[in-house]
Amino acid sequence: MFLQKKIGILGGGQLGAMLIRHAVDFGLKINILDNDKAAPCANYSSGFVLGDTLNYDDVMKFGENLDIITIEKEAVNTQALHDLQTKGVKVYPAPETVEIIQDKLTQKRFLESHNIPVVPAIAIENRLELRQYAEKLPACLKLRRDGYDGKGVMILKSADDIANAFDKPSILEDLVDIKHEISVIVTRNEEGEIKCYDPILMEFDKVKLLLDYQISPCDIGENIAQEAITIAQQIAKALQLKGILAVEMFVTKSGKVLVNELAPRPHNSGHHTIEGCNTSQYEQLLRVITGMPLGDTASTAHTIMINIIEPPAERKGSTEAALKAIAQIQGVHIHWYGKSEGRAGRKMGHINITAKSHDEAVTLANKTRNTFNSLYEKN
Ligand code: ADP
């Protein structure tokens, strides 16, 4: 029976935990590989294996007895995924897809070769080479590998900033005059069927380069929304995607849509799909990997997602008081990741707020955020 397959996920973070939550609906048992024994999935998986998702032997040992393997982060050993595939394990997404995306330079060159609009960039080996391109500044420097949550990204305003720039293989991108940051989540199954979710609008904290909140459906204009969806579909086809892909895009002030980056796994920008869409992104991925038809992706509510970030210890208020207070607000759905507290800047959970209209969602989200922060953080 397809629902009795042995399934494994590389990575045991909150995205994996939300996959497990949805796997329960299908009676699926999920095994996890993660090197943190306190990872969010540790409490919920059927088999938790301690090991490094980037280590060949760890991934091989974990995957050898599984039928199906998928990922909840890109930092995985793709050689092991190739070899597991050769041994008959079904791997989602294909290891080749992960390899293209793991490196921001190969990702960009792949998209360019398929005529997908991207932000122009040049490859930089190290800080010394960067000095030759001082006349290109201001620009955006990004590590080719292993950046996340803005940690591998820096804006270089002038040559004075080069002394503190990354000294590793990077890309130097033109600075984009950003009007909106949006994301489209697209899924494609092995039959080649493709479904997209409505674009979501992401609002970023301009200082920390960290997500503030996101809203879906969003008011970016019918033409731009359609263009973003078409681009996501083209990328899914170009990659021959088997699985789920988040396509983060910029809408420029002159109205162009440019792809910023791809993530071939469940994504933050799809958190709202749990309460805000007919089929969540997590269920959708489970449908792909178990060979079920794709679910309907239509939005069923106006949803705003707010991340909960751990404040510095000296400003920490009461988690319990904050959660109890927002639990009284209509439309609030709490997603708490069960991480150990204490590291400032850590994503501890998120809140989805659902409402019947955009305006109502905004009013409730502001009330929720103010109520939560007034108790969770001391001024
Ligand atoms: P990460 O993978 O860490 O999320 P991103 O590539 O999404 O990194 O960049 C983080 C943020 O930096 C973006 O959301 C955007 O606000 C800003 N940014 C990224 N690239 C550019 C660019 N070329 N021009 C201007 N701002 C950018």
Image (cartoon, rainbow, N blue to C red):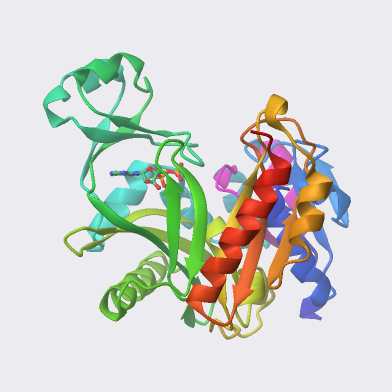
As for residue 74 lying within the magenta part, the answer is yes
The residue that appears at 23% across and 16% down in the rendered structure is 160
- Rendered location of residue 350, percent (x, y): 66, 55
Q: Nearer the viewer, residue 235 or 240?
A: 235
Among the 4 quarters of the image, the one containing residue 274: bottom right
- Res. 172 in view: yes
Quadrant where the C terminus is found in the figure: top right
Asked whether, in this view, residue 140 is left or right of residue 310, the answer is left
Residue 377, by quadrant, is: top right
- The span picked out in magenta is 56-78
At a point 44% along the width and 54% down the height, the residue shown is 203
Viewer-proximal residue among 77 and 215 = 215
Residue 54 position within the rendered picture, expressed as x and y whole percent measured from the top left: 62, 37
The residue that appears at 61% across and 84% down in the rendered structure is: 295
Comparing 163 with 308, the one in front is: 308
Please name the residue shown 80% across and 64% down the image.
6
Horizontal side of residue 101 vs 164, given as left or right: right
